[in-house]
């Protein structure tokens, strides 16, 4: 299953290359400060993509993002004060009487201080790093969909909640960020043939057993060990990943979310030791994919079969 991907979050490039319109209203709703709403999980590249916005609504989105950042900075500053006091107290306790409890307190406080400082540095940093475009389940990404025949970019959460499913399913079925091809007409039947999208990715990541990557069996007494591999197309280029999406409404509010379709792996991924892979579709099939005919599912399967030919290289992720 594709648990993480590095997305293309450059709105200008997405609009220019794919003739899509940016749904500013949807982004404004995502970043809105509604009562009781938690800060949406968005990659830095997606937030920073609005810097320099010229329209009033675009500038309003920038202001909303900055407000979220200011509130998060305030929370992180408070966390640093609390953990610094905790660390000092634990160090004093350890100096007076060495105990395992004091050592644990020093370790925990130190780790939390490091995380808070790293997050603050990210919020203050102006330039983008490759990890700023990386998404995980629960994180939002720009998804290209079709509305009245027009390509539109909307922000959606990477873990799909279907309209007929309760919110608790997010925790009960955490793997719903991927939609297996062999379940498209079962669990995903209300989305497949109805709500299709694509996410533009530059690379994706998979958990793979080390012995499978090394194409060997486990040695006697050896425990399986997972490694994270980053797969990149060679030569480097963007891939259009086939997705299903959903609009959900309930007491918790409104949610746009998506899942990436996975299928049998191509040779490159299988030889690396993984048994599933996301599906890159051809650009010439984009409109047919985004505007599906629910009465002709065979045509949709043919698009998934006629996938983008791509050589994938991989390396262990840092």
Image (cartoon, helix red, strand yellow):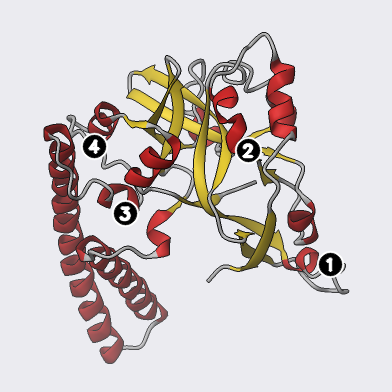
Q: Nearest to the eye among marks 4 and 2: give it.
A: 2
Q: Position of 159 compared to 281: left or right? A: left
Tags 2 and 3 touching, CB below 8 Å: no
The residue pinned by badge 1 equals 215
Front residue of 112/302: it is: 302
Task: Check residue 44 in the rendering and tell me which mark sits there, or answer none.
Answer: 3
**Does the image show residue 41?**
no
Residue at 61% over, 21% down: 192
Q: Position of 184 compared to 68: left or right? A: right
Element on which disc 3 rests:
helix
Tags 1 and 4 touching, CB below 8 Å: no
Q: Position of residue 15 (x, y in %)?
A: 37, 38
Label 3 packing within 10 angstroms: few (<14), some (14-19), many (20+)? some
The residue pinned by badge 2 equals 282
Q: Nearest to the eye among marks 2 and 3: give it.
A: 2
Q: Nearest to the eye among marks 2 and 1: give it.
A: 2
Q: Position of residue 189 (x, y in %)?
A: 64, 17
Q: Position of residue 39 (x, y in %)?
A: 26, 42
Tags 2 and 1 touching, CB below 8 Å: no
When the figure is inspected, residue 48 is found, relative to residue 175, above or below; the finding is below
Element on which disc 2 rests:
loop
The residue pinned by badge 4 equals 31
Front residue of 68/60: it is: 60
Q: Position of residue 217 (x, y in %)?
A: 87, 67
Element on which disc 4 rests:
loop
Element on which disc 1 rests:
loop
Label 2 packing within 10 angstroms: few (<14), some (14-19), many (20+)? some
Disc on the earlier residue, 2 or 3: 3
Residue at 45% over, 22% down: 146
Question: Distance from label 2 to label 3 (Cα)?
Answer: 28 Å
């Amino acid at each position: 299953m594709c648990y993480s991907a590095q997305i293309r979050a450059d709105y200008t490039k997405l609009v220019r290359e794919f003739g899509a319109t940016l749904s500013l209203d949807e982004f404004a709703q995502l970043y809105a400060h509604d009562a009781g709403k938690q800060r949406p999980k968005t990659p830095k590249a997606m937030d920073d993509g609005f810097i320099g916005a010229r329209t009033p609504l675009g500038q309003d989105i920038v202001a909303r993002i900055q407000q979220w950042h200011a509130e998060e900075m305030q929370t992180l500053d408070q966390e640093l004060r609390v953990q610094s006091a905790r660390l000092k107290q634990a160090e004093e306790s350890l100096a007076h009487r060495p105990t395992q409890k004091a050592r644990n307190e020093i370790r925990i406080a130190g780790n939390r201080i490091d995380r808070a400082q790293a997050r603050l540095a990210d919020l203050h940093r102006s330039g983008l790093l490759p990890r700023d475009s990386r998404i995980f389940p629960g994180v939002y990404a720009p998804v290209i969909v079709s509305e009245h025949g027009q390509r539109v970019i909307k922000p959606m959460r990477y873990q799909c909640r279907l309209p007929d499913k309760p919110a608790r399913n997010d925790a009960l079925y955490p793997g719903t960020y991927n939609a297996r091809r062999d379940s498209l007409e079962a669990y995903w039947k209300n989305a497949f043939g109805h709500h299709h999208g694509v996410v533009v990715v530059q690379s994706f990541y998979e958990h793979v057993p080390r012995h499978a990557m090394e194409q060997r069996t486990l040695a006697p007494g050896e425990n399986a060990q997972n490694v994270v591999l980053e797969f990149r197309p060679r030569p480097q280029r963007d891939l259009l990943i086939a997705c299903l999406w959903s609009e959900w409404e309930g007491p918790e509010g409104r949610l746009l979310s998506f899942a990436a379709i996975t299928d049998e792996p191509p040779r490159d991924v299988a030889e690396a030791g993984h048994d599933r892979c996301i599906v890159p579709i051809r650009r010439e099939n984009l409109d047919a994919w985004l505007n599906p005919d629910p009465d002709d599912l065979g045509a949709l399967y043919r698009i998934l079969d006629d996938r983008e030919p791509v050589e994938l290289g991989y390396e262990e992720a840092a």
